[in-house]
Image (cartoon, helix red, strand yellow):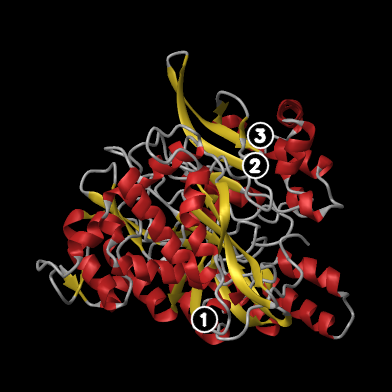
Amino acid sequence: MKLSSTVVKKQRDSRTPKINWARAEEAEHFAKTVKLYRQGKIDSDSFRRFRLQHGAYGTRMTDDYAMVRIKIPAGEIYPRQLEKIASLSEAFSIGSAHVSTRQNFQLHWVVLEDVSEIMAGLAEVGLTSREACGNTVRNVMCSPLAGTCNEEQFDATPYAMATAKFLLRNPLNQALPRKFKFNFTCCENHGMVRMTDVGLIPQIRIIDGKEQRGFKVFLGGGLGNKSFVGHQLEDFTPEEDLLYTSIATLRIFDRLGDRKNTARNRMRYLVDQIGWEQFKNLVLKERAIVRATQSVIVRLNVDTTPQKLLSPVRISGSDGKSVPDGFSRWKKSNTYKQKQDGYYCVAVTLEAGDITASQLRALADISREFSAEGCARTGFVQDVIIRWVQESDLRLLYSRLLEVGLANPGALTMVHPIGCSGTTSCNLALTNSHRLAKEIQRKFIEMRLDEDDDLRDSTIKISGCPNSCGQHEIATIGFFGGGGRNGKDMYPVYQLSLGGRSDEYTMLGTNVLRIPAKRVIPAILKIIETFKTDKREGETLKSWVHKIVTGQSDSKLKSVDDIKKILLPFTAAPPIESDKDFYADYGSDSSYHTRTGKGECAA
């Protein structure tokens, strides 16, 4: 049945989010506090802590603008919310939004006095920026495939949402030593549970003949200037212990975390300092105390009631029977067949997470029309997932995406790299990682590398500095930015690492060598070329790199040093007179420098 877009909107917007995350009064309070700060009645450090607690992050080299980070718990976002973000981006930002690797939306270059206007607008649709930054529990993540994954034992989404609701504005976590992160996932392959403070995988055990829900819990992982892989707390954590375990871990971190040394005050450093066995014992003892002393009213309100699926409707237009150009290529690299018969998840490829206001509105309409759950999910790799799409609708959905420039292939392949914001807005960035990610994506789509099955399971991730916001240490091919010098002339460079991964065999990448920014793409292509000539039958780029960095190679290339020798020619810097472009970063036509400001990851 074909209906007008107005009728479809009315029908689908009757489905509202289960949880309203907003408090309208916070916008007014923020506006008053900004005035006091401008009048000199609040010192800059106190205001900075307040600003971050309310989701307003500092913008590169200026106190007059902010980046507003919008919390999207479990990545679940509804059409009206997408449309509101579009309107706010036009009114107060740069006409576009950014999807982060932690499922948030971000609005950049917002005048400080306009932050409260954005907060008020978000509250109208049940969204908030509260605790999206600062030393508190950040956005609670959940795999965008949870509930549809073929490998999962049960849907972790309701538990992620309940945890987010319990911790938001909770006095328990308003002044932690540093930021704190929870990641829920569906299975070993669709999340980063070993690379976060608390990571959780849903598990089912048979106990006394009955099914018992619970989790495999990992503690003490995380990415940064120094990264650590998390440790499993115990063999099985029953669901009734989920909240007690979370509270106990937060209490231990709050009590023992380093508040003086901001460079080493994440929980992973505490675990490393006192040792895993001692930390584990502290958590288990604290959990027993929490279990015995918490009031019976302190509980997670987990709503596992399944949402009723919406009937398909069609907006007047194409019937989707014809096959648009590029559809087969797109379907192969952008869709995931759900465990539910006849349904697919569709990954919408963005360039380094960027999406315009008009595209946000189009995405809102697409999720209304095609998703049987009536909403979308933000992902872990700067993308948006439309779930519960009927297989028969994929052609028409692709046509809609094509019309608004959102039909790039390669979403679930190496062609879709991650790039943090870099020097476009971050105080700590040394290079424009954001732009480099876009350049790689455009070049590799042009080369049709998304169609190469040998490259499908590999990843490219790029950070603008060593702090790993771009997750470079868990990439097959990872980069973090820095500066190089040829005589008196500086140029942007990237440290290359190989062999990182975040699946069941999670490991950090191995540093290889520094490659100038303008040689990164040729260097990646050289790695691929070398792999093609050296690989054994059945090997993918990911498995080939893994065996080399772990010393298990049985082919011609035996070690990281062998790869280093092949890439060494890419490291030479030409005289500036012969290649001025080499000395400029992507997105810049001026001389490169390494000017940075004060970081705001800790306040």
Q: Which quadrant of the rendered structure holds the C terminus?
A: bottom right
Contact? badges 1 and 3 (CB < 8 Å): no
* Residue positioned 78% across, 36% down in the render: 273
Q: Nearer the viewer, residue 69 or 83?
A: 69
Q: Mark 3 or 2, which is nearer the eye?
A: 2
Indicate left or right for 337 with 252 as reference. left
- Numbered mark located on residue 228 in the image: 2
x, y percent for residue 34: 77, 80
* Residue positioned 59% across, 51% down in the render: 164
Which element type, helix, strand or loop, lies under badge 3?
helix
Cα distance in 3D space between marks 2 and 1: 40 Å
* Residue positioned 57% across, 40% down in the render: 194
* Amino acid type shown at disc 1: Asp
* Amino acid type shown at disc 2: Phe
* Amino acid type shown at disc 3: Thr
Label 1 packing within 10 angstroms: few (<14), some (14-19), many (20+):
few
Note whether 98 is above or below 234 in the view shown.
below
x, y percent for residue 9: 33, 72
Label 2 packing within 10 angstroms: few (<14), some (14-19), many (20+):
many
Q: Mark 1 or 3, which is nearer the eye?
A: 1
* Residue positioned 73% across, 75% down in the render: 30
Q: Which residue is mark 3?
A: 245
Q: Is residue 566 visible?
A: yes
Q: Nearer the viewer, residue 490 or 474?
A: 490
Which element type, helix, strand or loop, lies under badge 1?
loop
Q: Which residue is mark 1?
A: 579
Q: Quadrant of residue 220?
A: top right
